[in-house]
Image (spheres, helix red, strand yellow):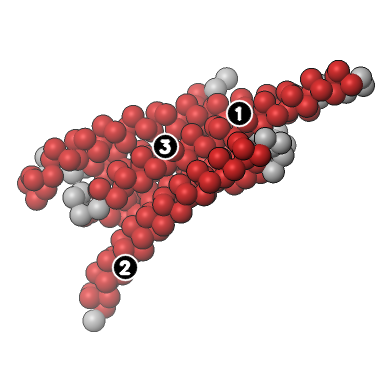
Amino acid sequence: MLLKEHTITDFVDITASKEPAPGGGSIAALSGALSSALTAMVNELTKGKKKYAKDQELVEKLCKEANEIREQFVDVMDRDTKAYNKLSSAFSFPKETDEEKKARSAAIQEGLVTCIETPMEMMELCVKVCSLVEQSVGHTNSNCASDLGVAALMLNAAVKGAWLNVLINLGSLKDRRLLKEYYDKGSSILEKVSGTVTKVYLDIEAELNHQVAEKLN
């Protein structure tokens, strides 16, 4: 049964169990899916608003793209668990003879690459959602400011969570060329996305705090 087919309660229960998957990688993907979903919702709730008449073409585009990426995050959520299971299986290969040891090592390295590429794919999706969140600022329903702020928070969790899953597998990768390639790409994405969504969140929090402070004075 795919993770996306579970109820929320069942999904949470499975995550809390002694089974190692779904783990941090799938949860990072879910965070990305929720960020995308909230971004879509904020834009959906801006459609048809006279106050945002000039933004209608933009919000239509952002809503469509956010929903498309949401589906991709849900897909990669399941693939992350499959990647982990494949790697875990490789560790159980026999290692009595030199030939078996060689085959086992090759299977582990192949599994590691898959376990790196899956969260790297999540990080690339985070770049796309980051752009949508950033474009939504100032062009969407102000009553949804808190929702957009949570979208930014969830995206930060997604990109950081995916990066941790890249790092933990990079440590065992023998191919130094691939290791450097993945590390350089991932660290660059992390800096860009995390920096952007942190600013979005802080700006929204500051504005909402300002609104409350005015009421208190």
Residues 209 and 136: in front is: 136
Residue 159 x %, y %: 48, 46
| Label ID, residue 84 | none
Alpha carbons under labels 3 and 2: distance apart: 27 Å
Q: In whole angstroms, how far apart are the C-alphas of marks 1 and 3?
A: 17 Å
Q: Quadrant of residue 174?
A: top right
First of labels 3, 2 by sequence position: 3
In space, the residues marked 2 and 1 are separated at their CA atoms by: 41 Å
Determine crowd level at label 1: few under 14, some 14-19, many 20+ residues with C-alpha closer than 10 A: many
Q: Residue 125 shows which numbered tag?
A: 3
* Picture coordinates of residue 40, whole percent (x, y): 29, 39
Looking at the image, is mark 2 or mark 1 earlier in the sequence? Answer: 1
The extreme bottom residue here reads 217
Name the mark nearer the viewer: 2 or 1. Answer: 1
Q: Say which element carries label 1.
A: helix
Mark 2 neighbour density, 10 Å: few (under 14) some (14–19) many (20 or more): few
- Who's the residue at 42% across and 42% down the image? 126
The residue that disc 1 covers is 114
Q: Residue at x 36, y 46 (%)?
A: 130
**Farthest residue toward the front?**
177
**Residue at which label 2 appears:** 206
Question: Would residue 141 appear left or right of 119 to someone viewing this image?
Answer: left
Position of 31 relative to 146 (above/below)? above
Left or right, 95 with respect to 166, comes to right
Q: Amino acid at mark 1?
A: Thr
Asked if residue 92 is positioned above or below residue 178 in the image, the reply reads above
Q: In the image, what residue occupies the spot 41% across and 52% down?
A: 192
User: Who's the residue at 44% across and 38% down the image?
Assistant: 124
